[in-house]
């Protein structure tokens, strides 16, 4: 699936990775091969195991970082995860902050 999804500098890719304990979100510009922003449950201000509540916090935090860079549209890359639970909570929280997925 990642081979089909390509982010640009105007519309970067929001990659979500979920492990058994944590959830990670990265904003990636595939054209320039750079990571523009990242957030996870390992961050000092969150520092909790992943559940739907912490996934919402990560989603809001990544949306704030996107707004600081002047980006309001991203391509959502959920990887091999189904759009349910923590992944859906992160996406909904990002949308609530005004980011188009």
Image: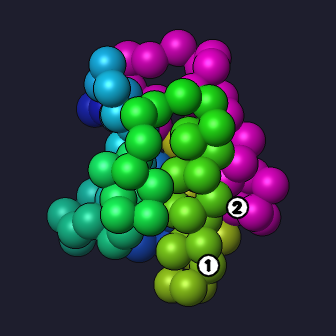
- Residue annotated with mark 2: 99
- 96 in the magenta segment: yes
In percent of width and height, residue 42 lies at: 31, 50
Q: Residue at x 71, y 48 (%)?
A: 93
Does residue 39 appear left or right of residue 11 in this picture?
left
- Residue annotated with mark 1: 67
Between residues 53 and 75, which one lies in front from this camera angle?
Answer: 53
Q: Give how far apart the Cα atoms at labels 2 and 1 are.
A: 8 Å
User: Is there a contact, CB below 8 Å, between mark 2 and mark 1?
Assistant: yes
Residue 12 can be seen, yes or no: no
Q: Quadrant of residue 98?
A: bottom right
In percent of width and height, residue 7 lies at: 40, 55
Q: Quadrant of residue 28?
A: bottom left
Give the residue at the far left of this rendering: 33
Category of crowding for the residue at label 1, using alpha-carbon neighbours closer than 10 angstroms: few (below 14), some (14–19), many (at least 20)? some
Q: Residue at x 60, y 73 (%)?
A: 64
- 59 in the magenta segment: no
Q: Residue at x 51, y 84 (%)?
A: 69
Residue 95 can be seen, yes or no: yes
Secondary structure of residue under mark 1: helix
Secondary structure of residue under mark 2: loop
Between residues 68 and 56, which one lies in front from this camera angle?
Answer: 56
Q: Earlier in the sequence, mark 2 or mark 1?
A: 1
Q: Quadrant of residue 100?
A: bottom right
Does residue 38 appear left or right of residue 87 in this picture?
left
Query: Bounds of the magenta span?
Result: 77-101
In percent of width and height, residue 15 lies at: 39, 44
Vertical placement of residue 19 versus 72, above or below: above
Between residues 46 and 57, which one lies in front from this camera angle?
Answer: 46
Vertical placement of residue 71 versus 54, above or below: below
Please state, as top left, top right, bottom left or bottom right, where the N terminus lies in the image. Answer: top left
Vertical placement of residue 51 versus 31, above or below: above
């Amino acid at each position: 699936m990642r081979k089909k999804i390509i982010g640009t500098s105007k519309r970067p890719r929001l990659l979500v990775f979920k492990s058994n304990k944590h959830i990670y979100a990265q904003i990636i510009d595939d054209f320039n091969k750079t990571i523009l922003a990242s957030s996870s449950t390992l961050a000092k201000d969150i520092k909790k195991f992943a559940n739907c509540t912490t996934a919402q916090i990560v989603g809001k935090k990544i949306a704030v970082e996107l707004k600081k860079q002047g980006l309001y549209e991203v391509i959502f890359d959920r990887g091999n995860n189904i759009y349910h639970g923590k992944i859906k909570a992160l996406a909904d929280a990002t949308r609530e902050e005004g980011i188009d997925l």
